Amino acid sequence: MRNALLAVVWGSASLMLALDGDVGIHDPSTVVVAGGKFYTYGTGGTSLVSDDGWTWRKGTALPLRQLAPDVIHIGDRFYLYTAANSGQTKADVSMIWTRSLDPGSPDYKWSAPVVVASSDGIEDANAIDPGMLLDPTDGRLWLTYGSYFGYIRLVEMDPKTGKRLHPSEVPRNIAINSEASVMIYHDDWYYLLVTHGSCCRGADSGYNIRVGRSKKVTGPFVDNIGVDMIQGGGKLFVGSGGRVIGPGHFGLLDLGDAVQKFSLHYEADLDRGGASVLDIRPLLWKDGWPVAGENVKEGTYQIESLRTGTVLELAVEGVPVGGRRTGRGGGRGAAGAEGGRGGLFAGTGDVIPPQDPAVVSTAWPKGNLDMRMGNYMSQVQQKWTITPVTGSGGYPGSPYFKITIAGTDRTLAATGEGELVVVSAFNASPEQLWRLDQLADGSWRITPKAGPNSKEPLSLSAVGSSFATLARFDPASEKQRWILKAP
Amino acid sequence: MRTFKRDASFLVVVLAAVAVLLVNALSGGAAAVPASTLSPPKTADLKPGPDGFIRRWLVLEPIAATGLTESIVQAAVRKGPFANEPSAIPRDEEKVNVESAQLTWHALDTSNYNLNLFHFARSLDKNTSNVLFWVVTVVHAPREMRDVRLAIGSNAASVWWVNGQEAIGIYGDRQTVIDDGVSKRLTLKKGPNVIQAAVVNGGGATDFCARILDSNDKPLTDFVVNLRP
């Protein structure tokens, strides 16, 4: 069932929007949330910061201007790992830490660098591109590193200091022919995400992110067709698409409540002159494998409850498409399915056009209207246009959206009582702005930016088969999961 | 006279230093490092690995080459040592003249599924970037094998021939992926079958792998490689 659901939503929901603001970066680290802000760091000691994960601006440069950092928050410290080459494959991974990422904080002070991993220029490795995992099952800390010269390697770190736990430990080889490695843990599996292909060639970059998995943090990591990543295996996670080329450098952004996203960069955003830019997208899971989701795009949809199969609709009397039947002999016209014989099931013989919102809506009462759910009948009051709103902020990966009956100004809004209403016109108030987060199974959580007087975030929720309300999001329930389908 | 001898000695030293600098500039420039994954063959025949990867090759020292697009790579391979003898089999340590450079063929066994050309070139203190490597092997089939396919991967671009016929080419900057390029159906004749390839590297690591798949896309393992016909 869930596999079929993913197939439906992928075929229906449209492609992603780019992030807002200044998003130029190369090889971004995992995005870290601290003090209500989002931080990421890139090659050359660059940094980006955002108040909401949608609009970004340049941050304070790092004291170490090296390659492809990663960041991890453990206890009261933020550990940053980065690397530099001193020969073709001779390199060092260094660690610095701080108690705050906010340059305005008195705790913002980076430590002196400590080398934690190296390659000597002869061995089969190039010690760059560090990636960090704090194992949620046992609290152990792991560093992966490496690039195309030789192996991706794994060593254990001390979570109390960020340094090597056993400095003389021989690194384990876990993958080859890749770089930008990082591990994540999900449902009893360890996943090794790496980047394959070529970087740094703008629109000619072949960068793509691939994944293998293991039941043990030490591997072996095997892809979905059984090829070990030590032999260059890896299931494709995300490649180029649309107007963006060369995705690389995966970073997990777990927002809680089973909402996961990932950060990455594209070697070339064609809408930004081919610049290397940051993006944040939904992280889905299918058959035990991570799948790159796509942020919702402007379009007209039917919004269907995963639980009930009924769709959101304005609470008005609907009119069948093509008009009501006038007798037993069928609809307009006498033509039937076969040579004009007519009959109840023969159809009209002509194409029945979609309803015109401008015509249908004249019969609706003015002012605020209720909404409900019903079987989808391709009628005007059941089709919703989701439109990004500029200048009203956003959330990781997307701006806020307005949701209106297609072809009209009737706008979905939250009420102070945690219910839903459709108002006659959009005015950009927080109750009329909606956040759509894609969940692991491809369905969507739909949440107003603010419900008046609400003290906790509430999400669109089916109640029964025929009504919807706002309720506290329960990741285990299907009531708050919605499918966006092309109408 | 004494002055002349002193001046001549000094000149010899200077010329020798210049020669060393020139050699370094033309070669890899880094100190030679033994290839940890490559060794000379110790037996006449070698079976493929358990996953069917061919592990014995004749490899020619690298030739300067720039560009990884299809047109550039195809133009480069037309000038190769096999231009007039498409199924020729060189010998270990045979020397050939290519574009006014004398290069040597090396017979090598790899301990991995792939042959690491970066290791190879570095072990000879040769350039590893912007170079083309010619490689040859001879697959001895126990019987005629129809509807098989050559499956290859390379870093970066490569063109492959089987018994003198071009079988597959992959282009652009890429890393080695198992079965990245797979040929149309081929027939291996009973006995020796010559497989040649030209692998072109831009920058960074460089290697390749090759195996033969049967009609069910399963790797063949019932053949041997012997570098003589």
Image: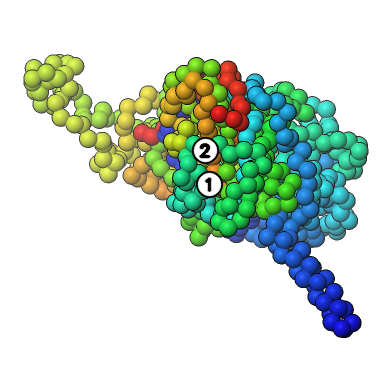
Q: Residue at x 71, y 43 (%)?
A: B119
Percent position of residue A362, x then y: 27, 42
Same chain, labels 1 and 2: yes
Per the rendering, the mark at residue B88 is 2
Q: In the image, is A486 to the left or to the right of A453?
A: left
User: Which sits earlier in the primary sequence, circle 1 or circle 2?
Assistant: 1
* Location of the C terminus of chain B (image quadrant): top right
Q: Amino acid at mark 1?
A: Pro
Residue at the spot of label 1: B81
Note whether B138 is above or below A25 in the view shown.
above
Label 2 lies in what chain? B
Percent position of residue A459, x then y: 57, 34
Q: Residue at x 89, y 82 (%)?
A: B2
Indicate the secondary structure of the residue bearing disc 2: loop
Q: Amino acid at mark 2?
A: Ala
Percent position of residue A357, x then y: 29, 41
Per the rendering, the mark at residue A405 is none
Label 1 lies in what chain? B
Q: Is residue B112 visible?
A: yes
Q: In the image, is A456 to the left or to the right of B147?
A: right
Q: Is residue A450 visible?
A: no
Q: Residue at x 42, y 30 (%)?
A: B184
Indicate the secondary structure of the residue bearing disc 1: loop
Which one is nearer the viewer's eye here, A191 or A451? A191
* Location of the N terminus of chain B (image quadrant): bottom right
Tags 1 and 2 touching, CB below 8 Å: yes
Q: In the image, is B112 to the left or to the right of A14?
A: right
